[in-house]
Image (cartoon, rainbow, N blue to C red):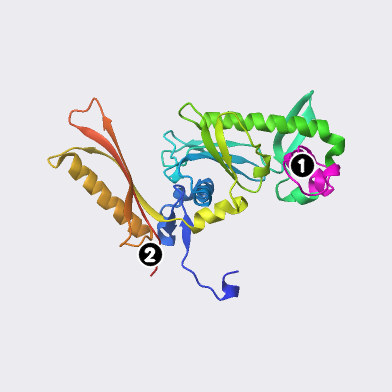
Amino acid sequence: ALASEGLDPVTFFAQNDGTLMALDFAVRYPVLTIGSGPANSIRGAAYLTGVTDAIVADVGGTSTDIGVLVKGFPRESSAGIEIGGVVTNFRMPDLVTIGLGGGTEVREEDGEVRLGPGSVGYRLTREALVFGGATPTLTDAAVACGRATLGNPAGGEAHRRLLEAAMARSDALLADAIDRIKVAKGDRPLVVVGGGSVLVPDRLPGVSEIHRPEHYEVANAIGAAIASVSGQVDRVVHLGPGGREEAIREACDEARERAIEAGADPERVEIVEIEEIPLTYMAAPTVRIRVKAAGPLGWP
């Protein structure tokens, strides 16, 4: 597609902290692309709203990713992430993912409303009731409850009771997921993005206000387009003769070098995060230091 337009751009890959990395860096560290999709959406949500601290719900066709925006970047998980049954020990955005999306199939089983796990996905415009299909979906439920206006609303009339019950069940699952992602009591603002965000009601328990920014459906692409390039250092150090300041300075220098190596403009790289965690029960003073540097793309 790019070649047909006469374009030969430099390639960058999104990584899972909401920033970018150059092609050669991505080849060496491909694992850092895992989780980049939700991270892009969280960054896009921050850009579209101007909000730097909030909960973000990215609702797609098959699932909903709920994460936390901290100082404009995705909050990193502090626990080991399991991928394909394998427990890993590398950085990942802190997410709660639930099987709710615009294409999620709705059915009644043993007198109870069931959501998923099946989804019509990209076939929504052929198989959903409001588009003349025969499969009740959460999009049909949103139309039946007045949250969305699309297709033929009469298509779901025969299933209205089921669809209204499905919408109530969806709202309960969303509220539970938001409660699980919070680490402190009190209501937090929620930014809703993604093509399926019509599923989210105007009020939810634990949410102080809901932001629905313009262009919400392409927040993921926007997050990638505006992303900076980062470098990160995470190490345990014994505080030597230079003490704490020397250890932090060395970590900052290395983080800057990694950001430049990943494709950042050397003249505009800044330290955006420093975290120190003292470690007890050690013979010598020891701390874990995490430093992140970020800067705009450096064009060759």
Q: Which residues are magenta?
A: 127-155
Q: Position of residue 45 (x, y in %)?
A: 53, 48
Residue underneath mark 2: 298
Q: Is residue 130 magenta?
A: yes
N-terminal-most mark, 2 or 1: 1
How many marks on residues?
2
Q: Secondary structure at mark 1?
A: helix
Q: Position of residue 116 (x, y in %)?
A: 71, 35
Single out the mark in the foreground, 2 or 1: 1
Question: Residue at horizontal 71%, vertical 30%?
Answer: 168
Residue underneath mark 1: 143
Is 245 located above or below residue 229 in the figure?
above
Q: Secondary structure at mark 2?
A: loop
Q: Position of residue 65 (x, y in %)?
A: 57, 40
Is 275 located above or below residue 44 in the figure?
above
Q: Depth check: give the residue in front, 242 or 222.
A: 222
| Residue extending farthest left | 241
Q: Depth check: give the residue in front, 28 or 213.
A: 213
Q: Amino acid at mark 1?
A: Val
Question: Residue at horizontal 83%, vertical 40%?
Answer: 156
Question: Residue at horizontal 78%, vertical 34%?
Answer: 163
| Residue extending farthest bottom | 6
Q: Is residue 152 visible?
A: yes
